[in-house]
Image (cartoon, helix red, strand yellow):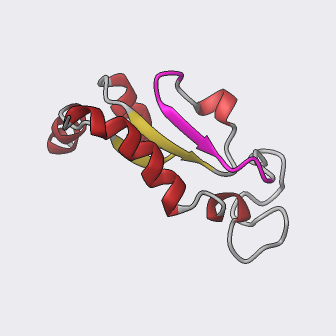
């Protein structure tokens, strides 16, 4: 855990879905690009981070009786699949290019 904290503290950007690593990185002052699916961006998001949400059907966490299953009965979470690699890359690149120019 100590090594993980050191890596987070010295990172330019931490990319992750909402969870414990994002909370730790944010408290260490590391900028995060956070992918939100079922969890509420207004409740779990940090203003200093890049918070991405698909705005398709989320947030449904705590609304649906089974938090391990998509509320729309989809095999895979539609809200997360809508956050494309291209969109995530664009946000990360726009931020990180400032460190190489």
**Residue 1 horizontal/vertical position (percent):** 21, 43
Residue extending farthest front: 101
- Image side of residue 3 versus residue 24, left or right: left
Residue extending farthest bottom: 75
| Residue at the (14%, 43%) spot, across then down | 3
For the C terminus, which image quadrant?
top left
Q: Does the magenta stretch include residue 48?
A: yes
**Residue 36 horizontal/vertical position (percent):** 61, 46
**From what the image shows, is residue 25 above or below residue 39?**
above
| Residue at the (40%, 45%) spot, across then down | 92
| Residue at the (68%, 73%) spot, across then down | 76
**Residue 7 horizontal/vertical position (percent):** 18, 41
Q: What stretch is highlighted in magenta?
A: 47-56
- Image side of residue 88 versus residue 25, left or right: right
Q: How many marks?
A: 0
**From what the image shows, is residue 76 above or below residue 54?**
below
**From what the image shows, is residue 89 above or below residue 71?**
above
| Residue at the (66%, 61%) spot, across then down | 82
Q: Quadrant of residue 79?
A: bottom right
Q: In which quarter of the image is residue 74?
A: bottom right
Q: Nearer the viewer, residue 59 or 65?
A: 59
Q: Nearer the viewer, residue 66 or 58?
A: 58
Q: Which of 57 and 65 is in front in this view?
A: 57
**From what the image shows, is residue 77 above or below residue 31?**
below
**Residue 15 horizontal/vertical position (percent):** 39, 47
Q: Main secondary structure of the magenta part?
A: loop
Q: Does the magenta stretch include residue 3?
A: no
């Amino acid at each position: 855990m100590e090594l993980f904290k050191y890596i987070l503290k010295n990172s330019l950007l931490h990319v992750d879905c909402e969870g414990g690593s994002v909370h730790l990185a944010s408290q260490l002052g590391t900028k995060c690009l956070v992918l939100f699916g079922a969890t509420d961006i207004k409740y779990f998001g940090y203003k200093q981070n890049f918070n991405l949400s698909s705005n398709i059907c989320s947030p449904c966490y705590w609304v649906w009786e089974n938090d391990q299953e998509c509320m729309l009965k989809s095999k895979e979470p539609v809200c997360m699949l809508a956050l494309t690699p291209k969109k995530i890359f664009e946000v990360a690149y726009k931020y990180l290019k400032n460190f190489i120019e």
